[in-house]
Image: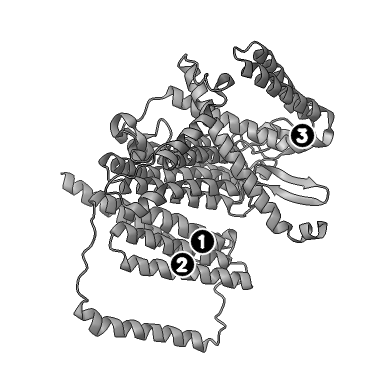
Amino acid sequence: MTEFLSQYAFVIVPVVKIVLLVFIVLTVDAYLTWLERKVIAHIQARWGPYRVGPHGLLQPLADGAKFILKEDPTPDGVDKKVYFFAPFLTLMLALTSLAVIPFGPDIRIGSFTTNFGIADLNISLLVLFAITALSVYGIALAGWSSNNKYSLLGGLRSSAQMISYELSMTLSVVGVLLMAGSLSLKEIVQLQDNGNLGLLGWNIIGFSKDGAGFTQVIGCLCFFISAIAETNRVPFDLPEAESELVGGYHTEYASMKFAMFFIGEYTAMITVSCLSTILFFGGWLSPFPASWIWAHYLPSVILIPLGLWVIFDGIRYETILGRIVLPGLGTALVLIGVALAAFTRANELVQGPFWFFGKLFAVLFFYIWMRGTLPRFRYDQLMDFGWKFLLPVSIANVILTSAFILWRMHG
Amino acid sequence: MSFALLMFFVLAGLAVLGALALILQRHPIHSALSLILVMLSLAGLYLLMGAEFVAAVQIIVYGGAVMVLFVFVIMLLNAGEEERTNFSKLASVAGIPLALALAGVIAAAIARGSGHLPSATNGELTSTRELSKLLFSEFVYPFELTSFLILVAILGAIVLAQREQN
């Protein structure tokens, strides 16, 4: 049995990882909608989902059941092949792009080492850009094939918008690439690790041992703004502006086909947040200097009070289900926190993923925060902003960064 | 080797199928989609040869930018289905013999190579670093001249658009 396992490990390990990743990502997508509704509700002084399960925690399940059970009519005069293909394409590309993201440092279990992610390519950044470039088709084709003028307008808007912002997104990353000298996301993270510099070594601040690092604040801003435009989120959600276009490119889609666009959009959001974490915020690296050993207990320090608060909140909850589920959840969190403090090996294993997912959560929260705060762009403002502001600024960032690196290396 | 060969036949088959579909489809959007399939399978073939950077650029530039513009224009003009026309006389007199002749020449060239075509990649040329070193040292003048050519084309398009406005 062990012989079989070691012989076919190169097939078994990726397959297990793929199944796990798809399962986790779909769950996270579902709970991202819950988080989004809760956060926006609180921004707008409402409660958000509250009825289905304690604190509305079962709302994503109810939504999923609704999507599956809804009638799925095909409108008259649609281009059938393209109409069915478009949602599949969107979801497929969104899920594929997660395959090249490294979520943490390599995992070592005994003598077996594997990377924390599905594929570790030396051109992973280019692969991500290639997938982003293709994901325009999902939306554009959905809009075109629906045989509906609002859908068509949404599709046209999205293709124009995504082409425009792809330029500044690609250019804003060049600064990071100049500093790293590599297209591999794993190496980009490893090069931000400067031992005792901690947080100062991240690309957004840009200290490095040889002094050839240049702060990428401009690059980070440009990247994040164009990334929001690429994922069609507020304030750049013109392809689905409901006040002008009914539902935009997905007006004619219902049931699971609509859900596929929805999941695709949220997955793209996760990918882009992972990417900005990796490129500018040090990926899985801790913000504290490596010599601060106490920082390794931070996961426990956060998990235990969180768990206690959930227990405290749960015992006073209105429904009986809530009084059972919430304290249970809290106890689980506390137990995990205690276990991480007690077992050093588990603690070491969890450091990388803890920081990566912590940063990822912060970026996703920022995304949702923006949605709750900002109004939508007008279309001409969107184009002006992309071409006349974002593009020149990201080119200036490339020139500044390369000039600085040249000066430090030869001057 | 056998796996690489299998992948080659799958990708090459897809490319040929896409190219045939490009001609045989009657709707411009379907033709454009078939062309994207051709581009993607070509990128797969480059990847199979170890030219990762070229493969990625093939998808980003051709699959992404160029074909999105094609699709965009077709959607904007709202082009309908094409009508089938009779086989053109010029095609039957000149086209088919010339196409056969071209196929013959290529087949002869491959046959003379006795099954061993020279490798397209010399040594380390495939990596992004080597490629960019070559591009920015030995071929820097042709490379920069090409970008000027593209810039001139962009400026020309802007001038034409402006003239119409005035």
**Disc 3 to disc 1, C-alpha distance:** 39 Å
Q: Which of marks 3 and 2 is in front?
A: 2
Identify residue type, mark 1. Answer: Ala
For the N terminus of chain A, the quadrant is: bottom right
On screen, residue A302 above or below A138: above
Label 1, secondary structure: give it: helix
* Residue B142 occupies quadrant: bottom left
Residue holding disc 2: B14
Q: Which chain carries label 2?
A: B
Q: Residue A281 carries which label?
A: none
Q: Where is residue A171 in the image (x, y as percent from the top left)?
A: 47, 45
Q: Where is residue A129 in the image (x, y as percent from the top left)?
A: 50, 49
Q: Which of marks 1 and 2 is in front?
A: 2
Q: Which mark is residue B55?
A: 1
Identify residue type, mark 3. Answer: Ala
- Answer left or right for A403 relative to A377: right
